[in-house]
Amino acid sequence: MRKIMTLCAVLTLCIACAEQEPASLADRLKAAADSGKILYGHQDDLSYGHQWRVSDWSNDPLERSDVKDVTGKYPMVLGFDLGGIELGREANLDNVPFGLIRKAARVHARRGGIVTFSWHPRNPLTGGDAWDVSSDQVVASILPGGSLEEEFGLWMKRLGDFLESLGEDVPVIFRPWHENLGSWFWWGLDLCTEQQYIELFRLVWRYCTQERGLKNLLWCYSPNGDAGPQAYISRYPGDEFVDILGVDTYEFVGDGTVEDASRRYVQEIKVNLTYLQELASAHGKLMCLSETGLEGLVEPAWWTGILEPAIRNFPICYVLTWRNADDRPEHFYAAWKGFEYEADMKAFSELDNIVFLD
Ligand code: BMA
């Protein structure tokens, strides 16, 4: 009897510990936001950077990082994309092996960092990629009763298998179906109804959380921010299904000057984060700037002169800049060693309100 009771106590403790993980990640994020600190994140860090890439990942200590090369510190938040996992592929859409993603997530969590995953799944109806918007029947086809319901069940299983393989001690901010208020992804605004979008989000949530019992996930809803608060909330999956409210907002130069683009960007960030703060407070949620950046960092003091003044004083728990492609020299969103304006990113990493991983 005593043995059974001890066993029960140990089991209860284990369950409590396991359940603590995402909760403690949420606490950590909340503590950062409450104390006016913003964690810095970078997509695909540790796996590749500007003109380099990890090749033999299973024997690589994963110590290289463009961000670390410049600032002496890792990004606190490490982002990866799971596009391709649904097909059982070896590597994601940017050729990062899922084995490397799993290892990097574990290594990063052990170093004290935080992991986030986005997901650009292929188009299940046309066979195209996530950007194939040639049909507005894709979401309908994978929802219950749709012609691809079973196929999508398999896609979710593969996703669930990967998330589970990380282990419960690696909590993850999962951010599926992002930028859904534009129409460039097959789950976008003109491609499905409000109800269908909400059902899609809930379907994957229910599968991961209830059917698979995954306890290591915090769910982030992250539309493109420019659509405004009414649109934002019209496709909100609901308080039960979301932990963090995010927005994706980039700086685009286009045909005008960089100065004009930066002015527009600061304005847009402030508008978006203002309504996000109101929504987060009304719904009792954390908030973040889930994706941002200026491709090629063509503004010399972008970090300290544009980004930080724009996000300062908003209770976002983190800000994530997009990837530094190894094979497209102009496609980078963090500085790298040797980049002409790298000193400004280092200065950003030393600000009191910005947190990197030492
Ligand atoms: C986009 C670009 C693409 C990439 C995609 C998913 O913004 O960086 O090159 O494939 O994100 O990571």
Image (spheres, helix red, strand yellow):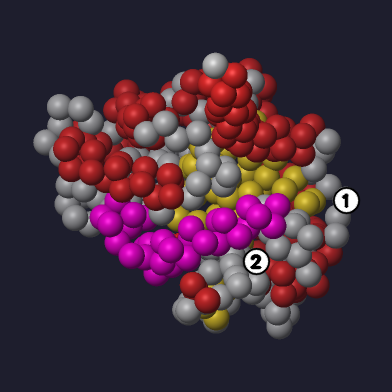
* Residue 341 vs residue 157, the one in the foreground: 157
Disc 1 marks which residue?
Answer: 352
Q: Quadrant of the C terminus?
A: bottom right
Residue kind at label 2, given as amino acid type: Ala
Which dot marks residue 11? none
Left or right position of 138 against 24: left
Q: In the figure, 196 relative to 225: above or below?
A: above
* Residue 313 vs residue 143, the one in the foreground: 143
Residue kind at label 1, given as amino acid type: Asp
From the top left corner, tell me how far across and down residue 138 is, in percent: 21, 40
| Residue at x-position 76% and y-position 65% | 73
* Residue 191 vs residue 13, the one in the foreground: 13
> Does any portion of residue 126 appear in the rendered image?
yes
Disc 2 marks which residue?
Answer: 334
Q: In the figure, 320 relative to 62: above or below?
A: above
> Does any portion of residue 141 appear in the rendered image?
no
| Residue at x-position 40% and y-position 41% | 177
Q: Residue furthest right?
A: 352
Q: In the figure, 258 relative to 79: above or below?
A: below
Task: Determine the secondary structure under disc 2.
Answer: loop
Q: Is residue 251 magenta?
A: no
Give the magenta range: 83-112
Left or right position of 355 against 97: right
From the top left corner, tell me how far across and down residue 262 is, in percent: 68, 56
From the top left corner, tell me how far across and down residue 209 is, in percent: 42, 30
Q: Residue furthest left?
A: 147
The quarter holding residue 19 reads: top right
Q: Quadrant of the N terminus?
A: top right
* Residue 20 vs residue 222, the one in the foreground: 20
The quarter holding residue 293 reads: bottom right
